[in-house]
Image (cartoon, rainbow, N blue to C red):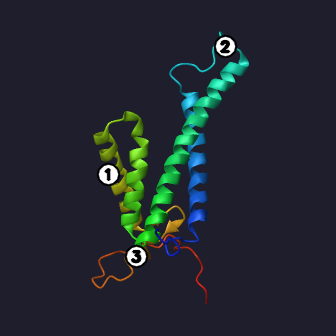
């Protein structure tokens, strides 16, 4: 039996909840846009109001479910790998993106499409993680904390902030 005591990271449930929240919000937005721009109307004269609302709700919840599943897959994979490997680097984001991308293209039932989509999403998420960009601001010192050549520009998003005297 594998001892998972050293693998568990206390911040993982909070991070998973945060990504689930992003998945729900993104799914609701995309589902609403799909309803508004549907090629075939979800409401027709042949349907009563309850059936029309059911069609609209189904379309929105379907998008919300997929977005939430993809966000949870990415977050859980990334967090589990950080615990198993003991490192916080772009490889964790790559494999999280690989799993999330494969989930996105799972409906094709084509392993080549699933793998290529997974690799693309994995490369994108690893590049985003390595660049230091986060949803909450610049975190570029995470990987580029020392630059003896002086070639990496220091970008400060908060250039107008008052410095403490």
Mark 1 or mark 2, which has the lower sequence index? 2
In the rendering, at what x and y percent does residue 114 appear?
34, 43
In the rendering, at what x and y percent does residue 134 appear?
49, 64
Give the crowd class for mark 1: few <14, some 14-19, many >=20 residues within 10 Å. Answer: many
CA distance for labels 2 and 3? 60 Å
Q: Secondary structure at mark 3?
A: loop
Q: Which mark is residue 119?
A: 1
> Is 140 on the left-hand or right-hand side of 60?
left
The answer to whether residue 1 is above or below residue 100 is below
Mark 1 or mark 3, which has the lower sequence index? 1
Quadrant assignment, res 130: bottom left
Residue labelled with disc 3: 154
Q: Which mark is residue 47?
A: 2
CA distance for labels 1 and 2? 43 Å
Q: Which mark is residue 39?
A: none
Count how many numbered circles sit on residues in the image.
3
The residue closer to the viewer here, 46 or 83, is 83
């Amino acid at each position: 039996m594998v001892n998972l005591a050293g693998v568990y990271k206390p911040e993982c449930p909070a991070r998973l909840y945060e990504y689930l929240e992003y998945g729900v919000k993104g799914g609701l937005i995309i589902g609403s846009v799909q309803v508004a721009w549907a090629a075939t109307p979800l409401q027709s004269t042949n349907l009563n109001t309850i059936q029309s609302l059911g069609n609209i709700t189904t379309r929105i919840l379907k998008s919300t479910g997929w977005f939430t599943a993809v966000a949870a897959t990415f977050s859980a994979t990334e967090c589990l790998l950080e615990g198993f490997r003991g490192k916080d680097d772009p490889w964790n984001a790559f494999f999280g993106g690989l799993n999330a991308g494969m989930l996105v293209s799972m409906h094709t039932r084509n392993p080549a499409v699933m793998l290529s989509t997974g690799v693309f999403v994995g490369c994108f998420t690893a590049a985003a993680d390595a660049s230091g960009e986060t949803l909450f601001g610049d975190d570029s010192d995470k990987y580029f904390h020392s630059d003896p050549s002086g070639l990496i520009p220091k970008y400060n998003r908060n250039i107008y902030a008052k410095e403490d005297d």
